[in-house]
Image (spheres, helix red, strand yellow):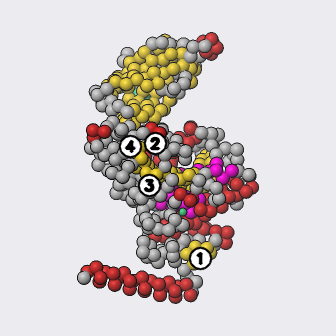
Amino acid sequence: MYQSILLLVVILTLYAATIAADSLEGRGLMNVCYDEYGCFTSGPPFGLTLHRPIALLPDPPEVIDTRFLLYTRQFKDKGQAISRHTTLGTWDRTKATKILVHGFLDTINSTWWPEMKDAFLEAEDCNVILTDWSRANYFPYTKATANAQVVGADIALLVNKMIKEHGVNPADFHIVAHSLGAAVAGYAGHRISGLGRITGLDPASPFFENTDPIVRLDPSDAKFVDIIHTDGSPTLLLGFGTLTQVGDVDFYPNGGMNQPSCDKTSAKLIHAILNLGPLDIFGPMDIQGECTLNANEGNFMGYHASPNKARGRLYLNTQRVDKAPYCINHYQIRLISGSNFVQTKGQILLTFTGSRATQSVLLDSDETFLKRSGIETRYIPLTTDLGTIQRVNVKFERAGHLISSLIYSSKWTFTNVTVIDGDRQTSVTFCPENGEMVLESGNTARFYPC
Ligand SMILES: *[C@@H]1O[C@H](CO)[C@@H](O)[C@H](O)[C@H]1NC(C)=O
Ligand SMILES: *[C@@H]1O[C@H](CO)[C@@H](O)[C@H](O)[C@H]1NC(C)=O
Ligand SMILES: [Ca+2]
């Protein structure tokens, strides 16, 4: 009974909406065209559909006022304003270009965007462009979703200019977008033929779930679309992501879900992802909802995700405690050198003694170049949970070859080492046990909480 009444109401509403749409269309109010941007509609599939009963038209491009800030290794900290009308600044056509896009209510000033920009520049000599659409991404949400189309078009106009006028391969562009920014990325990709890659971080779900691929991010928007779903954040700023598979490969780390032995949250995972570490191997999920853990069927989440490895829905964790340990423990270390010596190069072996386990890791798989008062920051994923870290040993071994002995000091000092435990969200700084000491190559220094 209730159901048929409900159905009747839905039908009547849709009928009324259609009439309204017809009359709106008659007066030309359902579409709007902005020169080179083309036309936008609030009709199907963008509006007047079951999942999007009401849609708004986007604001004019000059009101939305999308801005782009370019960063390169030479201009790491101060972004250069670039635009297709004025200048592309020091944008280098011979290098890959990463375009970062924030979401609803967010701005490029949230800590994770500068952090991601820095991480990209550290990992790769590339162009990083921060997309600022903060004049068009606030309430009402329906307006922001409409404006996202114009922002996507703005990105496409910029990228297509770079492709056409500078002969760049579209495959060299990679858009990384969060929340409602993922929709922006989809609209951009739709307009950029052969776009290399889109990474969607928690693509927004309201207004996009079950919509036409034209309306949302989907695998046709780039050659490779990888998605990370951490879900579950109750705040509009961080979350309300979709759990539906929308990319070529969708990663579901256990953020927001019940994982009794591995209770990580999305914020921590986002932090780990931003540090671009290759996380764990992920098994594809079988029909029973259990993971298979076959290294050949995995992929890497984040920066290292590959179109040539497993696709589909990939999970970080198993559902069952007795299948552990498939959790990764996220540590970050910051090792600060003293000012006694100019420079050296060698291998740094760190040994962490925790309340649960002791583990040694090399700072770098290769030799590390150390500068006077330099700061070495590394993301260290471990399969072991160390517990509370009580001591850090630092062993220094200078590079062996003859030339090294001439230009690199055989002695070194470290002021302190900070260990951030990403899962416990703690940060502890360790100091040398007897104050700063001179460490001879081959020797080990012990550090205790300062
Ligand atoms: C970001 O911060 C800079 C410097 O404080 C400020 O000039 C700019 O307006 C901010 N941008 C946004 C979108 O909030
Ligand atoms: C670690 O070393 C740096 C550089 O010498 C110093 O600024 C900082 O205060 C030290 N931290 C602690 C906790 O001692
Ligand atoms: Ca699409």
Q: Position of residue 325 (x, y in %)?
A: 33, 36
Task: Find disc 2 in the rendering and name its residue.
Answer: 298
- Tell us which disc is closer to us: 4 or 1: 4
Q: Identity of the amino acid at label 1?
A: Val
Residue 186 coordinates in the image, percent (x, y): 54, 60
Q: Is residue 179 magenta?
A: yes
Disc 4 target residue? 292
Q: Compute the Cα span from label 4 to label 1.
A: 50 Å
Q: CA distance from mark 1 to mark 3?
A: 30 Å
**Residue annotated with mark 3:** 202
Q: On the picture, is 74 further left or further right than 393?
A: right
Can residue 69 be seen at all in this image of the molecule? no
Disc 2 from disc 3: Cα separation: 20 Å
Q: Earlier in the sequence, mark 2 or mark 4?
A: 4
Nearer the observer, 15 or 232: 15
User: Residue 430's spot in the image, x, y percent?
Assistant: 38, 26
The residue positioned 52% from the left and 86% from the top of the image is 22
Question: Based on the displayed image, in which of its 4 quarters is residue 150 positioned?
Answer: bottom right
